[in-house]
Image: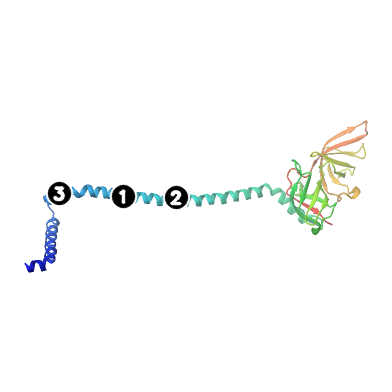
């Protein structure tokens, strides 16, 4: 009895080991029929294993779905950032394309003009569709004075660039100036017809420029090009104004009136040059 009590635990371990080895030996060989004990154990454990496997699979699929969702969201965010960047590049390119003619004319005038000019950005305008009056970002510190002539570069013929008249400075500060354009009703400009040298005076009216010739018998036709005459000293001489689009003779008033198409598009002005010499 003493022996059994002393070595009870060791004997139990040894017995279990022998049983396991026997079971392994019996199940290790290929058999046509399994034992009743094995069948009973399998019958009990199979549904449990099925449930456990199903739960484990569902858990795995759940976490895989979460990881997939996170990855898709990250990729979607990156694609959104790329789309925003591309849209910004497209806008910049469209902006450049839209200003191509102006930029080309601007470069040509800077290269070929005989005047000292200051490039200025328009920073404000009065309400309305037309640029009758506007403010630029250059002033006294840049050499701009009241009465200075304001121009843009224009292409009057294929490959032929000239200064086109915009208006004149009517007020100026240290770093700003206000410009009154030739389409404003308070403005007037003396001109000459380049073909005949006949002269007259023009004035603006709600985006339209009309005028009359000093000589009612002057030779003027549609398509004649007009330049500033320099009379009165209001504008620099020989700056292109535009071309005649209509001619009317008034026999009673003994005048010959004209309407012109200005060289400048007064609905689209981005930058201008101010003559400072």
What is the C-alpha distance between the residues marked 2 and 1? Answer: 22 Å
Q: Looking at the picture, tell me which residue is in the foreground, 253 or 186.
A: 186
Q: Mark 2: few, some, or many residues within 10 Å (few <14, many ≥20)?
A: few
- The residue to which callout 2 is attached is 72
Question: Looking at the image, is mark 1 or mark 3 earlier in the sequence?
Answer: 3
Going by the picture, which residue comes out furthest to the left? Answer: 1
Query: Is there any visible trace of residue 34 in the rendered image?
Result: no
Cβ atoms at labels 2 and 1 below 8 Å apart: no
Q: Say which mark, if any, is on residue 151.
A: none
The residues tagged by marks 2 and 3 sit, at their Cα atoms, a distance apart of 48 Å
Marker disc for residue 57: 1
Helix, strand, or loop for circle 2? helix
Q: Quadrant of the N terminus?
A: bottom left
Q: CA distance from mark 1 to mark 3?
A: 26 Å
Q: Earlier in the sequence, mark 2 or mark 1?
A: 1
In the picture of the structure, the residue carrying the numbered disc 3 is: 40
Vertical order, 160 against 22 (above or below): above
Q: Earlier in the sequence, mark 2 or mark 3?
A: 3
Q: x, y percentage for residue 25? A: 12, 59
- Residue lying farthest top? 252
Q: Are marks 1 and 3 in contact (CB under 8 Å)?
A: no
Q: Is residue 144 left or right of residue 53?
A: right
Q: Nearer the viewer, residue 15 or 162?
A: 15
């Amino acid at each position: 009895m003493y022996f059994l009590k002393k070595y009870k635990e060791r004997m139990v371990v040894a017995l279990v080991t022998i049983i396991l080895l026997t079971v392994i030996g019996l199940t290790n060989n290929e058999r046509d029929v399994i034992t009743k004990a094995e069948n009973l154990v399998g019958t009990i454990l199979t549904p449990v294993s099925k449930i456990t496997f199903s739960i484990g699979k569902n858990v795995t699929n759940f976490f895989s779905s979460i990881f997939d969702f996170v990855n898709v969201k990250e990729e979607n965010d990156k694609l959104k950032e790329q789309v925003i960047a591309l849209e910004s590049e497209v806008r910049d390119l469209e902006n450049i394309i839209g200003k191509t003619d102006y930029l080309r004319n601007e470069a040509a005038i800077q290269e070929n003009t005989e005047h000292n000019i200051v490039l200025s950005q328009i920073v404000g305008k009065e309400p309305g569709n037309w640029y009758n009056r506007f403010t630029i970002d250059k002033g006294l510190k840049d050499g701009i004075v009241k009465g200075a002539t304001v121009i843009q570069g224009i292409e009057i013929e294929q490959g032929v660039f000239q200064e086109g008249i915009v208006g004149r400075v009517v007020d100026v500060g240290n770093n700003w100036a206000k410009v009154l354009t030739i389409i404003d009703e308070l403005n007037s400009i003396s001109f000459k017809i380049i073909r005949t040298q006949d002269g007259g005076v023009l004035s603006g009216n709600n985006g339209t420029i009309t005028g009359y010739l000093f000589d009612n018998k002057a030779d003027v036709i549609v398509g004649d090009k007009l330049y500033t005459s320099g009379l009165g000293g209001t504008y620099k001489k020989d700056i292109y104004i535009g071309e005649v689009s209509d001619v009317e003779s008034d026999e009673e008033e003994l005048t010959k009136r004209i309407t012109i198409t200005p060289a400048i598009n007064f609905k689209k002005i981005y930058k201008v040059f101010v003559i400072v010499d």
